[in-house]
Structures are given as structure tokens and as C-alpha cells.
Amino acid sequence: MPTRGCWKMLFKLGLTVIILVAIYMFYAIDTELKSTKVTEEGFSNLNNAGQDTKYAADVVDELKTEIKTENEKSSVPPRESIHLAVVACGDRAEETLVMLKSAVLFTYIPLTFHIFTETSLMVHFQQQLDFWPPKYRQRIEFALYNITFPEHDGVKAEEWQKLFKPCACQRLFISDILHHIDSLIYVDTDVLFLGPIEDIWALFKSFNSSHMSALAIEHEDKAIGWYNRFARHPYYGEVGVNSGVMLMNLTRMRASPWLQKMNAFYKEYKLKITFGDQDLINIYFHYHPDQLYIFSCEINYRPDHCMYMSVCKPAEKVGAVILHGCRRVWFEDKQPAFKAVYQAFKEHYLGGSLRYDLLASITKNLAAAEPSNCGKVEGLFTRRIDSHLTHIDSQQQQQQQLPMDQQQQQQHKENPIS
Ligand SMILES: *[C@@H]1O[C@H](CO)[C@@H](O)[C@H](O)[C@H]1NC(C)=O
Ligand SMILES: *[C@@H]1O[C@H](CO)[C@@H](O)[C@H](O)[C@H]1NC(C)=O
Ligand SMILES: *[C@@H]1O[C@H](CO)[C@@H](O)[C@H](O)[C@H]1NC(C)=O
């Protein structure tokens, strides 16, 4: 029989338990309220999340876990994403939409598109992206921005607008405009992703403490380099850099003399530059080489890499990772292999099979294209997609060998949103 003292102790214990449960419940409800708020605030929260001071792969890992747990909890949208920026003016809207489609095809990670464009094209972008099948539409957020240029240090806004092609210089000021974003991948409108975008994002992890941006060099072959033969202004390294695919740590760019220098360089070199913003970027990194991380040619693969002979060796092994159809090769007949690949992406409908629709039609278009040096490089346009699909297939096979409940968990992981 318990004694009086013992009853008292049990009573106290019971009371403590009740209080603890009450506190726990209070917090649980509070958290739930907070996560509902996140849904409502949606986009702004997503942007704030970009300020996190985590390296890319960690972020990517976190994204995966976050989506998984969110998915388990039911449908609170993910709060972090990979940011992709593009400047699209004039007749570039169509290829931009094909590029955005290629970005979403190979990833389950949520993407945020920052599209700088003319006011007249905004409705078009809005409608086209809203028209994506829900499964893909859910994975993206997008924001449209007017083209705006700074007007200080005696350089007029119109001057920036006229330099090279309309709107091209906009990207020089992205760090200033998207002041709430930590980092992003900037691409020209004429690129195609041939594999998961998180592979590119992971390059941020390779940055040392002084790197703020990453680019590929302009030429692998010095003999046909443009900058080393013709430029009348300073440029990066021995052959200059190409600006078609650019990783930008905006936080670091804002802390650097980037903006201030752009105005100064523009004033000093405006009569000597040919390729507008790319030349200014080259001039900047000529003076600040420690701030630039150089990635390999298969991440910005251009016709120059194969038109005379194959000069980008990594691409021969792994295939092009990002294809850059510069000088309008998507639309003209100068490089039939590039055009063939673009056509396949353009005609691919979101939701179609990547292997039996997309990859099959790339292969078919390539076989039907006029012979060319680029077309001769074995596997250049297909190997990256093929290895990505093989990887996914093998993951699915592994799942089939798992017991049923684990299988379902795996599926959540692989396909967190749908
Ligand atoms: C960008 O740089 C800032 C400041 O050094 C750093 O905190 C942040 O993690 C970097 N972002 C990425 C994606 O690496
Ligand atoms: C872009 O500019 C136009 C005209 O100045 C304005 O009506 C529109 O609201 C702006 N759009 C955005 C997204 O800023
Ligand atoms: C970062 O790497 C670059 C070369 O890419 C180098 O010039 C620079 O000194 C390095 N910075 C630090 C802090 O090690």
C-alpha cells in the first residue's frame, strides 16, 4: 500500500506531466500556425530563405529533406529553391521558354525564375508558364521584372540599354536589383540544360572565400580565340571568359566594388568594346582574377568547341551539360546538330517521357541533320541525358527490391512534389 508521502509524490509527478503536455501542445499549435503563414506569404518567404549562409550542396541536401518532411506533413510548399535569372527581350521569348522548360525537366528541386523582360512580353511569359501542367507548375515560382538601369556617375540609362543588344547589360545590375537574393545562376536565353540544375548549383560549394562568380573561358583553343587576337581592352586570363552561363553570389557582389567599377569601366572603354556586357565582365575580372571561379567547358558548351575539331575533352566523356546555342544556331542552318537538339526540346511536351519522347527525338533529329563536325562528336548531345535517366532507372530498380512501405518512402523522396 502506498503511503501518504508517496501519494503526494505521485500527485506532483502527474501535475508535472500535465503541465509538460500543455506546453508541448502550445508549441505544436504555434508551429502549425507559423507554417500556415509560410504558405500565405509564399514568394517573399522563399526569397528571404535565399539569404541563408549555407553552401550549395548543403542547401540542396536541405531542400531535399525539407521537401520530404513537408510532403509527409501534407502540402506546405517548399520554402527554398534554386534561383535562375534570365534577361529576355525582343524575339527571345520563345527560346527563353524552351530554356526554362529544360531547367525543370531534370530536377525535382523547386526553382525560382527571375525574368527580366520588356513590359510587352510579360503577359506572354505569365500565360505560358501558368499553362504548364500542374505537376511542373507547382515546382516553380517566377517573378517578372521590367528592364531598369541605374543612372549615376554620369552614365545615362539609355546608354546601358543601347550597348550591344537591347537589355543585355541588365544582368550587370542584378545584384543591386535582387538585393534580397543571396545567389543565383544567370543564363543567356539561348542555353539548354541537359541535366539536373543542382549539379551546376553545387559549384558554389567549390568557391573559396574570394570567389563571387563563376564562368567558363571563352576558348579552349588559343589559335581561334577572339579576345587574344582582337580585343582592344583588358580581358580575363589568356583568352577571356564567356558570360552565357554565370554563377553569381550576389551577396559577395554587393560587398565588392562591382557596380561602381562597371560605371568606371564603361566610361573608359565604351568605344573599344564589341560584346557589350561580356567585355565589361572580362575587364572587371582582368583586374579581380581572385574573385572568379572557372568551371569546365562542358557547362557552357558552344559551337566553337566542335566546329573545327572537338576541343572540349570533358564533353566527349560526359556529354555537354549546358548547351549554349550562341550566334542563333538554334534557328539558322550553320550548326545543324545544335538546331536538331533545340527542335527536340522545343517540341517536347512537359510530362512526356524523357527517354522515349525527348531523348528519342534528339537522336532522330541528329540522325536526320546535315553532317557537321559537331554532329560527329559521339554522344555529345545525348550522353548527359542518357546517364541521368540511367541513374534514375537504377534508383527505381533498387526501390523495387525494397519491401512495400520503404518503397513508398523512396518514391516520396524521388518525386517529392507530385
Ligand atoms: C555567398 O556568399 C555569402 C557571403 O560570403 C555566403 O554567406 C553564402 O553562403 C554564399 N552563397 C552560396 C550559395 O554559396
Ligand atoms: C513595368 O513597367 C510598366 C510601365 O512602366 C508598368 O505598368 C508595370 O506595372 C511594370 N511592371 C512591373 C512588374 O514592374
Ligand atoms: C581563390 O582562388 C583564386 C583562383 O581561382 C585565387 O586567385 C585566390 O587567391 C583564391 N582566394 C583565396 C582566399 O584563397
Image: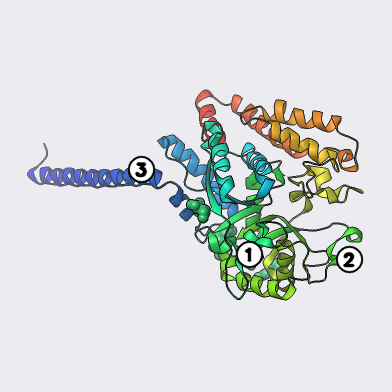
Task: Classify residue 414 by image quadrant.
Answer: top right
Q: Secondary structure at mark 1?
A: helix
Q: Residues within 10 Å of mark 3 (few under 14, many from 20)?
A: few
Label 2 vs 3, first from the N-terminus: 3
Q: Are marks 1 and 2 in contact (CB under 8 Å)?
A: no
For image coordinates 76% across by 61% down, the residue present is 275
Q: Position of residue 342 (x, y in %)?
A: 75, 38
- Residue to which mark 3 is pinned: 36
Q: Residue at x 73, y 56 (%)?
A: 295
Task: Say left or right for 325 vs 371.
Answer: left
Residue depicted at x 58% and y 41%: 124
Camera-nearest residue between 111 and 24: 111
* Residue position marked by numbered label 1 in the rendering: 158
The numbered mark, 1 or 2, whose residue comes first in the sequence reads: 1
Q: Nearer the observer, disc 1 or disc 2?
A: 1
Q: Amino acid at mark 1?
A: Glu
